[in-house]
């Protein structure tokens, strides 16, 4: 059964080819460092662990350090 969301419908309405690339072909989206903190937060929440979020940041943000 197909799963629909506002984001999927809006993307299809905006650009059917981009929808195809993202949801049908499942091509990876270009990396954008703006979303790195958000991804870290989501990974930490999914794992119920702040350590997971910090590890993700350390691996993906070159300027992050403990000092």
Image (cartoon, helix red, strand yellow):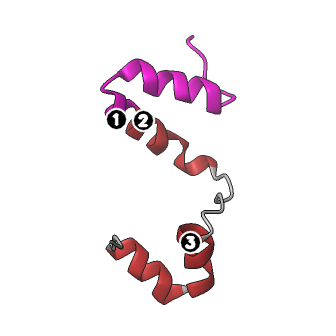
Q: Residues within 10 Å of mark 2 (few under 14, many from 20)?
A: some
Q: Nearer the viewer, mark 3 or mark 1?
A: 3
| Residue at mark 1 | 46
Under circle 3, the secondary element is helix
Q: Is residue 56 magenta?
A: yes
Q: Which mark is residue 63?
A: none
Q: Which part of the image, by quadrant, shows the C terminus?
A: top right
As measured in the structure, the alpha-carbon distance from the residue carrying label 2 to the one carrying label 3 is 24 Å
Hey, which residue is sitting farthest front in the picture?
Answer: 1
- Taking the image as shown, residue 41 lies to the left or right of residue 12, namely left
Q: Which mark is residue 24?
A: 3
Residue 59 falls in image quadrant: top right
Name above or below for residue 33 compared with residue 3.
Answer: above
Residue range in magenta is: 44-67
The answer to whether the residue labelled 1 contacts the one labelled 2, judged by CB atoms less than 8 Å apart, is: yes
Q: Where is residue 38 drawn, in percent x and y? A: 45, 44
Q: Residue at x 62, y 47 (%)?
A: 33
């Amino acid at each position: 059964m197909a799963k629909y969301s506002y984001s999927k419908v809006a993307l299809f309405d905006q650009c059917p080819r981009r929808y195809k690339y993202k949801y049908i072909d499942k091509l990876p989206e270009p990396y954008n460092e703006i979303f790195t903190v958000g991804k870290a937060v989501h990974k930490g929440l999914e794992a119920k662990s702040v350590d997971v979020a910090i590890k993700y940041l350390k691996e993906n943000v070159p300027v992050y350090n403990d000092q």
